[in-house]
Image (cartoon, rainbow, N blue to C red):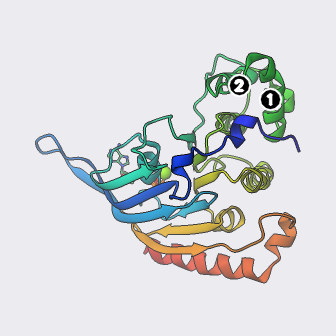
Amino acid sequence: MPSLPDTAKAPVPEQRKGGPVVSVRDVEHTYGGRGRGAESVTALGPVSLEIPAGEFLVLVGPSGCGKSTLLRLIAGFERASSGEVEVFGERPEPGNQAGIVFQQPRLFPWRTVGDNVGLALKYAGVPRPERAERTAELLERVGLADTAGRRIWQISGGQQQRVAIARALAGGKRLLLLDEPFAALDALTRERLQEDLRTVSAETGTTSVFVTHSVDEAVFLGTRTVVLSARPGRVALDIPIGLPRTGTGPDELRGLPEYAALRAEIGTAVRDAAR
Ligand SMILES: Nc1ncnc2c1ncn2[C@@H]1O[C@H](COP(=O)(O)OP(=O)(O)OP(=O)(O)O)[C@@H](O)[C@H]1O
Ligand SMILES: [Mg+2]
C-alpha cells in the first residue's frame, strides 16, 4: 500500500502534546429562534466529550439527533449556543484544524479528479514537483488510479466521495471529521474503503470523528463508539472498542466473539436511543 504524504505525518506542535485533541464541555446547540415568531430547534446537548490523540471515535444515533451538528461545532462551522468546544486547545476555525468529509462530496466539478487532489496538496504546502506522485498515491489508495484525468461531473457519486476522502487525506491534518462518508457507496466499495480507512488511521495515528448509522461500521472502524440519544442528542453510551488495530484481517476481525458482543451492545443502545 502506498505511503501517505509526509504532511500527513507532521508532528503535533509541542504545546499541544498531552491534552485532548477535541474537548467538548457542556455543549448545547439551538438553531434559529432569533427573529420574532421564529421557531427554535434544540439539536444537541448538553454533551461533554474528550477525544485524545489517536482516537477513532464513531458517533451513532437516530436521524436528527445532532450528529452532524456536533461535527460542525468541532469543525468551527457553528458556534455552540452554550458550553465550549476546543480543538488542539483552541477555538475551532473552519478549515484550520481539521480535514472534513461531508455526507455529500464537495468538489470542483469542472476540474479533473487529479486536479482536485493536487489542489489540496498545494494548500497543504506540498511542493509542485512532488504533487503528481502524491496525487497518484492518494488516488490509488481510494481505488481511483484510472480516473485521474476525468472531470468530477464525469464520475459516479461513489467515486466522487472517494475523491473527497483522498482530498481530506491530502490536507495532512491531524484531525479528520467524516460525516457518513460511505453512506452512498455500494457494499463492496464501502467495505474496501472501511478497510483502507482503518489501516490509514492505525498507520498515521490520525485522530478521527466519524458519523454513521451502521453499527457494524462503528465496531469495525472505531477505537471508541459514542451513541447519542434522540434529539437533543446526549451521550447514551460511550464504549471503548478494544479490538486489534493491526495484523487482523477483516473477516477474522468480524469473526471474533468480542466483535459480536460489541455489535449487540451498541445495537441495543441505538435501538433504545431511537425510542
Ligand atoms: N441549519 C439548521 N437550522 C435549523 N435546524 C437545523 C439546522 N441543521 C439541523 N437542524 C435540525 O437540528 C437537528 C439535528 O440535525 P443534525 O443534522 O445534526 O442531525 P443528524 O443526527 O446529523 O441527522 P442525520 O442522521 O439525519 O444526518 C434536526 O432536528 C435538524 O432538523
Ligand atoms: Mg447528519
- Near-viewer residue (136 or 187): 136
- At horizontal 83% and vertical 76% (from top left) the residue drawn is 255
- On screen, residue 115 versus residue 188, left or right, reads left
State the image coordinates of residue 191 (x, y, percent, origin top left).
Answer: 78, 55
- Near-viewer residue (11 or 99): 11
The local secondary structure at tag 2 comes to loop
- On screen, residue 112 versus residue 212, left or right, reads right
- On screen, residue 217 versus residue 45, left or right, reads right
The answer to whether residue 145 shows anywhere in this view is: yes
- At horizontal 63% and vertical 47% (from top left) the residue drawn is 181
Image quadrant where residue 150 sits = top right
Above or below 225: residue 150: above
- At horizontal 51% and vertical 48% (from top left) the residue drawn is 15
Question: Which corner quadrant holds the N terminus?
Answer: top right
Give the numbered dot on residue 134.
1
Q: Which residue is mark 2?
A: 126
What type is the residue that disc 2 sits on?
Answer: Val
> Badge 1, how many Cα within 10 Å: few under 14, some, many 20+?
many
Mark 1 or mark 2, whichever is nearer to me: 2
- At horizontal 44% and vertical 57% (from top left) the residue drawn is 23
- Near-viewer residue (225 or 154): 225
State the image coordinates of residue 38 (x, y, percent, origin top left).
Answer: 17, 44
State the image coordinates of residue 68 (x, y, percent, origin top left).
Answer: 46, 51
> Badge 2, how many Cα within 10 Å: few under 14, some, many 20+?
many
